Image: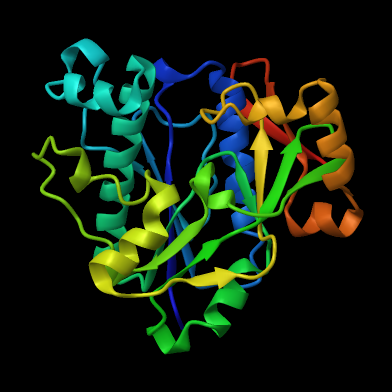
């Protein structure tokens, strides 16, 4: 059976705008992955701070990153990275995320995963996604896949907004690569190019072609939902603004959130509750 590894780099609490919300989003993502019709998957959550609730499943591993979370002023390569990202906040977040993805990929390769996928903690995949990939994997000889289209969703909405093209430019959950294409760096390196394969997702397709002369296959259907919330780095929240242009765009691209789509992408609300003795619990609703 073809084995797929999904690496989720979880943001540290120090960088969180709303830690409880981000833990809730992470749990939704994990639960959605566990609904996959294909069983040959393993999820690696790479974290600094242990999430508020862990899912007990043999297909999920919570792994502490070996790297200390660095503030901008403590980073030895902060000036070079600032020239790239133009923001101290983005420097910290991208550097942290990239190293976690590389560390998670190292764990996946040691576990003999055939394919590795980077996934953000606030996205949802079609429950048929890995089953369909396995059917087009050519026995493990396919170099991998990329997504061209998908959906946006804001919690509480009764519709999805179609992204008809170039989803990979602003979403990090859009590529699945053969393990031979994922190089594990020397983690003492301070060179961004050693870590940025998955984080610079807009160029993965071209990079694989240039470096390996391999062509990634396109996923021909919208298999991804990007959940819009207040902590999105890409500022995709603006797509739900109230300008005339945004309203017209949503009208033209809106898709009713049917029960079948809700089930396919596990678009349910998770609400944290706290018991009287302070233990954190979680409630799954279909609202």
x and y, in percent, of residue 206 in the image? 37, 61
Quadrant where the C terminus sits is top right
Res 129 visible: yes
Q: Residue at x 29, y 74 (%)?
A: 213
Q: Please, is residue 163 above or below residue 23 in the view?
A: below
User: Residue 209 occupies which quadrant of the picture?
Assistant: bottom left
Left or right: 170 in relation to 35: left
Q: Closest to the observer: 139 or 175?
A: 175
Q: Residue at x 13, y 43 (%)?
A: 187
Residue at the extreme top of the image, as rendered: 73
Number of numbered markers: 0
Residue under the image location 33 percent in, 16 percent down = 88
Q: Is residue 135 above or below residue 42?
A: below
User: Image check: 99 left or right of 257?
Assistant: left
Q: Which residue is drawn at 79% across and 29% down?
A: 246
- The image quadrant that residue 241 belongs to is top right
């Amino acid at each position: 059976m073809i084995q797929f590894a999904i690496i989720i780099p979880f943001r540290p609490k120090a960088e969180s705008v709303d830690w409880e919300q981000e833990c809730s989003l992470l749990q939704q993502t994990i639960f959605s992955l566990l609904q996959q019709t294909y069983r040959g998957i393993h999820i690696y959550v790479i974290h600094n701070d242990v999430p508020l609730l862990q899912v007990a499943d043999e297909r999920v591993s919570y792994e502490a990153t070996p790297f200390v979370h660095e503030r901008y002023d403590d980073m030895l390569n902060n000036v070079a990275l600032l020239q790239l990202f133009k923001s101290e906040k983005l420097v910290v977040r991208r550097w942290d995320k990239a190293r976690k993805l590389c560390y998670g990929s190292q764990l996946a390769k040691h576990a003999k995963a055939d394919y590795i996928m980077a996934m953000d903690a606030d996205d949802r995949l079609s429950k048929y996604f890995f089953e369909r990939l396995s059917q087009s994997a050519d026995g493990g000889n396919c170099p991998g896949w990329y997504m061209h289209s998908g959906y946006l969703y804001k919690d509480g909405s009764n519709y999805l907004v179609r992204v008809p093209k170039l989803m990979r430019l602003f979403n990090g959950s859009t590529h699945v690569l053969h393990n031979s294409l994922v190089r594990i760096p020397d983690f003492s390196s301070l060179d961004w190019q050693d870590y940025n394969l998955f984080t610079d997702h807009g160029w993965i397709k071209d990079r694989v072609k240039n470096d390996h002369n391999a062509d990634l296959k396109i996923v021909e259907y919208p298999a991804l939902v990007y959940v819009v919330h207040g902590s999105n780095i890409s500022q995709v929240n603006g797509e739900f603004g109230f300008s005339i242009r945004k309203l017209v765009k949503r009208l033209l691209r809106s898709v009713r959130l049917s029960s079948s789509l809700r089930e396919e992408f596990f678009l349910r609300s998770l609400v944290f509750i706290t018991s009287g003795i302070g233990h954190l619990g979680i409630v799954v609703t279909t609202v």
